[in-house]
């Protein structure tokens, strides 16, 4: 019997990681899909309905319609990150990551499998929040390419961020530190609930140092056709961050950082 080719072996291994990640998401759907839907509903009720009446329109759009893409993207960011950081660190903590690393799969493909799991969860939860948003406001896609590319690139970037965090983390406290003290503040200050044009000059200038602003603005452009930033710069930042973080993560895996320690 002829041995399977290397490409077929790699493809089967990649599929196995993706299927395992999907089964993990589906198995704990009460933790992965339901809480974001509930949280999004509360955001729409409190910020959209109650506060939105006082804010009025933003950029020519109803306030609830304006914040909907930002809330969807915020959900994609947090869930893409959370899925990978918890899955990979769990494998480290359970001491079964070694079985994967000694397999014939190249490290870059193992990393790609985890990224795929993070993107999958981000898109699934983002879809759930989109459905929730449709109960509160009208959403129509203005630019399909901008919408799809922005959500995919953002999901990849934060899945990679979760992977790198999991590599360096030595305990469960360390996988929650970055989301709590860095990711959440940057997300809330990234234009999810407002346009930076509403801010004073110094705050508007400071906002441009926040990479999440570019991701949210690019995604919002896909739905509404309006943006607070240069789209070429936004996509350049997302692509550059994805390439840099992927290269870094592969190098860390090759060195056994956080795994052989």
Image (cartoon, rainbow, N blue to C red):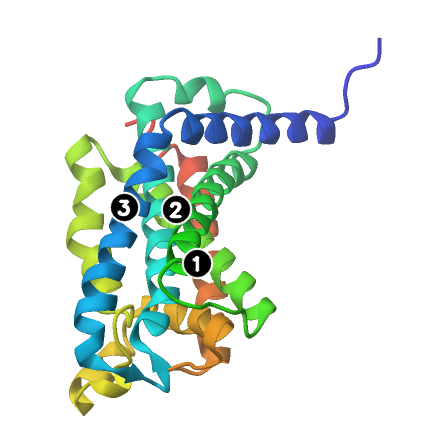
Query: 19 or 253, which is in the foreground?
Result: 19
Q: Where is residue 162 in the image (x, y as percent from the top left)?
A: 34, 44
The residue sitting at 44% across, 41% down in the picture is: 121
Which residue carries the number 2 mark? 80
Query: 36 or 5, which is in the foreground?
Result: 36
Quadrant position of residue 108: top right
Which residue carries the number 3 mark? 38
Q: Which type of secondary structure does the marked residue at label 1 adopt?
A: helix
Q: In this view, does 215 lie to the left or right of 100?
A: left
Query: 79 or 51, which is in the foreground?
Result: 51
The residue sitting at 31% across, 37% down in the picture is: 166
* Mark nearer the N terminus (2 vs 1): 2
Q: In this view, does 145 lie above or below 195?
A: above
Query: 8 or 222, which is in the foreground?
Result: 222
* Mark nearer the N terminus (3 vs 1): 3
Residue 58 badge: none
Q: In this view, does 238 lie above or below 152?
A: below
Which residue carries the number 1 mark? 154
* Mark nearer the N terminus (3 vs 2): 3
């Amino acid at each position: 019997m002829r041995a399977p080719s290397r490409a077929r072996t790699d493809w089967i291994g990649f599929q196995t990681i993706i299927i395992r990640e999907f089964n993990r998401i589906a198995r704990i759907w009460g933790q992965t899909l339901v809480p974001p839907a509930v949280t999004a509903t509360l955001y729409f009720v409190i910020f959209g309905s109650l506060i939105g009446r006082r804010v009025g329109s933003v950029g020519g759009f109803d306030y609830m319609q304006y914040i909907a893409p930002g809330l969807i993207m915020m959900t994609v960011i947090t869930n893409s990150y959370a899925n990978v950081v918890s899955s990979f660190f769990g494998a480290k903590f359970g001491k079964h990551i070694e079985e994967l690393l000694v397999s014939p799969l190249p490290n870059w493909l193992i990393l790609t499998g985890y990224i795929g799991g993070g993107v999958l969860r981000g898109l699934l939860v983002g879809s759930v929040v989109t459905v929730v948003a449709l109960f509160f406001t009208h959403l129509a896609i203005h630019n399909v390419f901008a919408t799809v590319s922005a959500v995919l690139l953002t999901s990849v970037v934060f899945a990679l961020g979760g992977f790198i965090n999991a590599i360096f983390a030595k305990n469960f406290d360390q996988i929650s530190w970055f989301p709590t003290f860095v990711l959440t503040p940057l997300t809330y200050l990234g234009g999810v609930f407002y346009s930076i044009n509403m801010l004073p000059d110094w705050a508007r200038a400071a906002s441009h140092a926040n990479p999440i602003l570019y991701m949210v603005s690019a995604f919002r452009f896909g739905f509404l056709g309006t943006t607070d930033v240069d789209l070429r710069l936004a996509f350049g930042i997302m692509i550059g961050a994805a390439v840099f973080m992927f290269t870094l993560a592969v190098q860390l895996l090759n060195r056994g950082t956080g795994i052989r320690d």
